[in-house]
Image (tube, grey):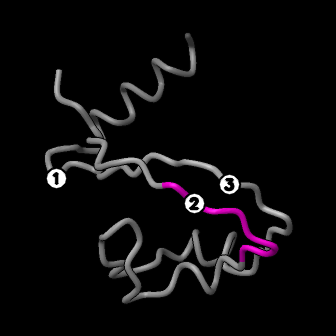
Amino acid sequence: MNALLTQRGLLKLSDKKAFVVAEEFKVGSKIGGRMLSGIGWNFSEHFLGVTENQVQETQIAAWTLLYTAGDKWFLKHWAESQTA
């Protein structure tokens, strides 16, 4: 079975008084050593106006969608995960 995603690394995020999404996610900025080349409409609509206060230190996994991944594979495996 082909994988849909590949993990690129773990990112440690330090604690902040305020995490302003629009300041952290700008086209051209680097996140985990990778250049952000575009922001989708859904992300812009739902998250760019968000500010989180008193954010604790955390660690997140960075993933990359593989070029070989297709909608058919994704929909099949997503549907299976919803019934499990």
Cα separation between marks 1 and 3: 32 Å
Q: Which residue is mark 2?
A: 13
Disc 3 marks a residue whose amino acid type is Glu
Total residue callouts: 3
Q: Residues within 10 Å of mark 3 (few under 14, many from 20)?
A: few
> Which of the two labelled residues, at mark 1 and mark 3, occupies the earlier sequence position?
3
Q: Are marks 2 and 3 in contact (CB under 8 Å)?
A: yes
Q: Is residue 64 magenta?
A: no
> Comparing marks 2 and 1, which lies closer to the viewer?
2
Residue receiving disc 3: 57
Which residue is located at x 40 percent, y 51 percent?
62
Where residue 60 sits in the image (x, y, percent)? 52, 48
Q: Amino acid at mark 2?
A: Leu
Q: Amino acid at mark 1?
A: Tyr
Tell me: residue 42, above or below residue 22: above
User: Mark 2 and 1 residues: CB-CB less than 8 Å, in contact?
Assistant: no
Q: Position of residue 47 (x, y in %)?
A: 68, 71
Q: Which mark is residue 67?
A: 1
Instruction: Name the residue at 27% across, 33% down.
Output: 73
Question: Which comes sooner in the sequence, label 2 or label 3?
Answer: 2
